[in-house]
Image: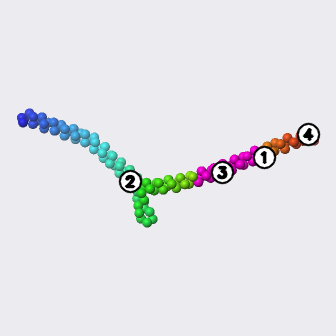
Amino acid sequence: MSNDHFVAIISGLVAVFVALCGLGGIVLPLLIKARNEARAANEQVSNNHVRPDGTPINLREEQDERHEANSTVLTEIRKDVKSVLETLAVHGYRLDRHHDDIERIEQTLDRRPE
């Protein structure tokens, strides 16, 4: 191998090294930022809850339990609202009937001046 080839190869390797260092200067801060954000996210979602017996509570299971409890409460509320609406409908029907009765009575009143 001649000196020219050796110099060309070394120059190429140096150029690649410089390019990688420059790229590392761009990529490394992004990797550090991603690592820090991942740590922050992990801190927010990591589960340090424990049951009364000391066993850890899985975050997903805890959310599923809460969802089930909320669903149960919402189902009960919907039943209560339906019952209230049915009661209002009955009272509305009765009020309409009484209104009709009142109108009939008013029509039969003697309206002559005294």
Distance from Cα at disc 2 to Cα at disc 4? 86 Å
Inspect the image, locate mark 4, and give the three-letter code of the amino acid beneath it. Arg
Residue 25, given in percent of the width and then of the height, sits at 26, 41
SS at circle 4: loop
The residue identified by callout 4 is: 112
Q: In which quarter of the image is the N terminus?
A: top left
Residue flagged by tag 2: what amino acid is it? Glu
Q: Which is more N-terminal, label 3 or label 4?
A: 3
- Most extreme residue toward the bottom, as rendered? 53
Quick check: 109 above or below 51?
Answer: above
Q: Residue furthest left?
A: 2
Near mark 4 (Cα within 10 A), the count class, few <14, some 14-19 or many ≥20, is few
For label 3, the residue is 84
| Disc 3 secondary structure class | helix
What are the residue bounds of the magenta stretch? 76-98
Determine which residue is flagged by label 2: 43
Q: Name the residue under label 1.
A: 98
CA–CA distance in space, label 4 to label 3: 45 Å
Task: Note whether 13 is above or below 44 in the view shown.
Answer: above
Secondary-structure class at tag 1: helix
Of circles 4 and 3, the one toward us is: 3
Cα distance between the residues tagged 1 and 4: 25 Å
Is 92 magenta? The answer is yes
Q: What residue type is labelled 3?
A: Val
Left or right: where 7 falls relative to 20: left
Quarter of the image with the C terminus in it:
top right
Q: How crowded is mark 1: few (under 14 residues within 10 Å), some or many (20 or more)?
A: few
